[in-house]
Amino acid sequence: MQPSAAQGRTVVRLIGRVQSECLAEIEAQIDGVNPRPVLDLEEVTLVDVGAVRFLSACEHSGIDLLHCAQYIRHWMASDRPTQGNSGDGGDKADRKG
């Protein structure tokens, strides 16, 4: 993770694997930064489901995601709860028995 500044905004560049265990550190870097920071994902090589949900929440809160790989965008879109869902956050598959 490398914070820098560009056009008056803090840019946090994420590098390599972004996994659930490093999210607290990323959140600490971006928490309270005004205006909203930008996350640069150009050098991200791998993410886990926790990271995908974190990135989706960041984007929902107004944090821009630069250079976000198509597979991450696709995963973020497929992980979002759909309107009229059962309220379980989209995490549970329909199970019988």
Image (spheres, grey):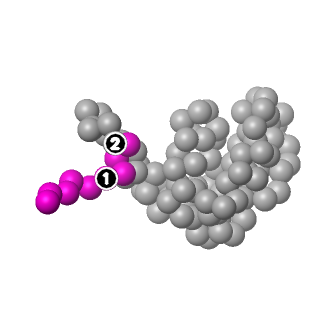
Under circle 1, the secondary element is: loop
Q: Is residue 70 visible in this depiction of the protein?
A: no
Residue range of the region highlighted in magenta in the rendering: 89-97
Task: Name the residue located 57 percent from the left edge and 48 percent from the top edge.
Answer: 54
Q: Quadrant of the N terminus?
A: bottom right
Residue at the farthest top position: 35
Q: Residues within 10 Å of mark 2 (few under 14, many from 20)?
A: few
Residue denoted by label 1? 92
Is residue 84 shown left or right of residue 25?
A: left
Residue 95 falls in which quadrant of the image? bottom left
Magenta segment main secondary structure: loop
Give the CA separation, mark 1 to mark 2. Answer: 7 Å
Residue 75: which quarter of the image? bottom left
- Is there CB contact under 8 Å for labels 1 and 2? yes
- Residue at the left extreme? 97
At 46% from the left and 51% from the top, the residue drawn is 76
The residue beneath circle 2 is 88
How many numbered circles are shown?
2
